[in-house]
Image (cartoon, rainbow, N blue to C red):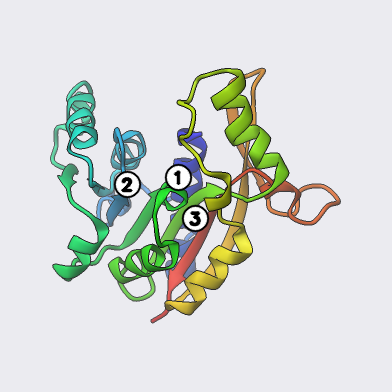
Amino acid sequence: MNQARTQYIRSRLTDLHHHHHQSSSLMTHSQLSKLSIVDIGCGGGLASESLARSGAHVTGVDAAAENIAVARIHAMRDPALSGGQLTYRQATAEQLVGEQKQFDAVVSLEVIEHVRDPVFFVKLLVDLAKPGAPIFISTMNRTLVSLVVDVVVPEYVLGVVPKGTHEHAKFVPPAELEQMLSAVGAQTLDVAGLVMNPLSNSCQVVPRHWGLLRDAGVQANYILMARKRM
């Protein structure tokens, strides 16, 4: 899933680049190196690493000291990440907003379903974005499909995720997330589904309205791109 999400992010950053510069190719490493990206709730740093390898300067932020420690150790295994384009910090989004930090892109993957106040959290993400900058959020829809795919199977059937990791009631439907973003100054530009293939152990990005059914692609996991209003 990490690969699918980060490829989506890079592709959408390229789309914005095309819009402003009328170019037609994927953003180059040097072009991405001009971008500052913050990864809020970075955990062990897998997404932060992938984005940094693309060339961007990435700041991975997590409130848990143990997560930041693991992320730093993991990054040390890749010499390509030793150039200073990836940094980690133990902090909260609220702390960064208090320091008036702003970035060219804001990323938060599989975090919002764990926070106490999702509306406040979304406002913090928007506050961290520069005017016109994109915000990427991935999470889980609140559907029967997500209950089975994201809770029952991984936690109670396969046992690959500790029981109680997810509360289905805290999952956020795309329409609710779009409303939250709109209320705090951001416009949703795209919503896409993230569909796992257990046979190939892979994940693919699919359209929101996949096939003939509305919202068929976002019944379980999805990723959303918004942009802070100017």
Q: Can residue 41 be seen at all in this image of the molecule? A: yes
Mark 1: amino acid = Glu
Mark 2 Cα within 10 Å, few/some/many (few <14, many 20+)?
many
Q: Earlier in the sequence, mark 1 or mark 3?
A: 3
* 210 with respect to 153 (left or right): right
Q: Foreground mark, 3 or 2?
A: 2
Q: Which residue is mark 3?
A: 12
Residue 74 in picture, x, y percent from top left: 23, 25
Q: Label 3's element?
A: helix
Residue 91 in picture, x, y percent from top left: 18, 51
Q: Earlier in the sequence, mark 1 or mark 2?
A: 2
Q: Label 1's element?
A: loop
Does residue 143 sit above or below 119 in this rendering? above
Quadrant of res 87: top left
Q: Can residue 187 be seen at all in this image of the molecule? A: no
Q: Which residue is mark 1?
A: 110
Quadrant of res 100: bottom left
**Disc number for residue 41:** 2
